[in-house]
Amino acid sequence: MTKSALQIERAAYQPKLPKALRGAVKVEKGNPTESVADQDAIKALFPNTYGMPIIQFAEGEAKAFKPINVGVILSGGQAPGGHNVISGLFDGIKNLNKDSRLYGFILGPGGLVDHNYMELTSDIIDEYRNTGGFDIIGSGRTKLEAEEQFEKGYQILKQLDITALVIIGGDDSNTNACVLAEYYAAKNYGIQVIGCPKTIDGDLKNEMIETSFGFDTACKTYSEVIGNIQRDCNSARKYWHFIKLMGRSASHIALECALQVQPNVCIISEEVEKENLSLDDVVTSIAEKVAARAAEGNNFGTVLIPEGLIEFIPAMKNLISELNDFLAANAAEFALIKKSHQREYIISKLSKANSEIYASLPEGVARQLTLDRDPHGNVQVSLIETEKLLSDMVAVKLAQWKEEGKFVGKFAAQHHFFGYEGRCAAPSNFDADYCYSLGFTASVLIANGETGYMSSVRNLTAPAAEWIAGGVPITMMMNMERRHGEMKPVIQKALVKLDGAPFKFFAANREEWAIKTDYVYPGPIQYFGPSSVCDQATRTLQLEKAK
Ligand code: FBP
């Protein structure tokens, strides 16, 4: 395999571990825990894995461990650092006993069900240390929920003498991990299941999980490119750039990028929902900024749009929710309707209010809303061109204002969607260290016989040596939500908190950023050089922790 100069240098990077993981480890257990909501329902569904204590590791005395065979799955969307979780896990189980073995299931949870696997030896692991991507074994979005899938998984685990499985994924995938842990515990199969918090979206977080891995690198990658666009737009002074950023539900990515680059406008979906704004309100607020800048002779700017926006506009949310239930219940009939008749068909089936909203949407967006849901029942918001929808509507509004004499400038838009550009970037030092620590932590949880836990590494704005490693019961993060028309136990998504420090900082500065051209150009991620440039956590984490 030909490698770039950076890849060659980067392969030699030794990720930093928390002090407690550098030698023998002692396990400290806290009090019993409760789920974040719907306690009775979650307790009834997870009788074997509910209420377990939080675990923290400290320096301890050396012990001998038998060799263990462990399986690993990469699940869901790619996020920088996944390979380091696997290398941390590999080094961790070899550290317990050099004869331990690691198996990777190919292309996500489907690999477990279909018995598609490979052994991950040290030669393979060494090729992937500190690299981006999930290509070592691939990823997938198969939802593990049927008993038949669990049993098929058990067959191959038993055959390979695997006694622990690590699922590296986001909220949906860790929900899978929890369901599987419960099932294997209930059956007494002797298989532990441990989760690791992955997602560039940053929405798998709570007190014990300060951030999901990949968020740091992805946001730094997008911020570099947005910074470049801002310099271009401040040079040419003729375009408004509408930039949609990934983040299926929460606006953490858009907010973090806004904190890094200081754009003219950044929409935060959670605020749109709270203020009960309509699509027209959002469009008007952008058009007002365009008009205000034009009045000062500045016919250029940047607008950051979170990918999930459409689902947070209350009227659109109702529409999507009815569409989800309708399409789940009538999938076969809908599949038979000709493409050219689908719009009319949907209009005729929805309730009056939703049917009117649906009918008012541009053709393309209406079609995008009926595309297949992902296996977890989510609308694939990455396929909805919100950046174009908003800029088209802003253009119409400004044309109207021009006639009324309220807009004196010119408006020309460029569109961008940043998502895939960052999901497989080479992990920043932060993600390289954090991921390696998460994987290593998973090995220690396994060594201590735990199941139904998520690997947790905290105190992340301190130097890595002071990070706190341990485990948090996955049931603690769960609540009941409607999916595919049914109530299901799922990990509660962490949305942007409007009373949290990152949003407050943004809100306090956004009016100034809107009118002034006060752009910040963060530049590319640096892997070598002063710690102030190479090892900084995200602005979100820094603001959240600066209490
Ligand atoms: P995960 O939640 O699985 O980490 O995926 C996040 C994400 O990158 C979202 O930001 C985006 O909406 C989605 O994946 C796109 O996934 P796909 O390419 O599978 O449609």
Image: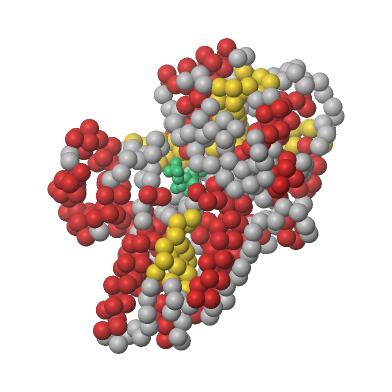
Residue 48, given in percent of the width and then of the height, sits at: 54, 25
Residue 37 vertical position relative to residue 516 in the rendered view, above or below: above
- 530 above or below 241? above
Q: Residue at x 30, y 49 (%)?
A: 368
Using the rendered image of the protein, determine whether residue 408 is visible from the camera's viewpoint. yes
Observer-nearest of 353 and 31: 353
Query: Which of the two residues, 78 or 309, is positioned nearer the viewer here?
Result: 78
What is the quadrant of the N terminus in the image? top right
Residue 469, above or below 219: above
Measured as percent of width and height from the top left, residue 512 is found at 53, 78
Placement of the C terminus among the 4 image quadrants: bottom right
Residue nearest the observer in this picture, 483 or 310: 310
Locate residue 262, reporting x and y percent.
Answer: 56, 70
Question: Which residue in the rendered view is the most extreme toward the front?
Answer: 2
Q: Which residue is at the front of the view, 446 or 436?
A: 436
Q: Is residue 281 visible?
A: no
How many numbered callouts?
0
Q: Is residue 498 left or right of residue 339?
A: right
Quarter residue 416 falls in: bottom left
Residue lying at 64% horizontally and 63% vertically, measured from the top left: 523
Q: Residue at x 68, y 34 (%)?
A: 127
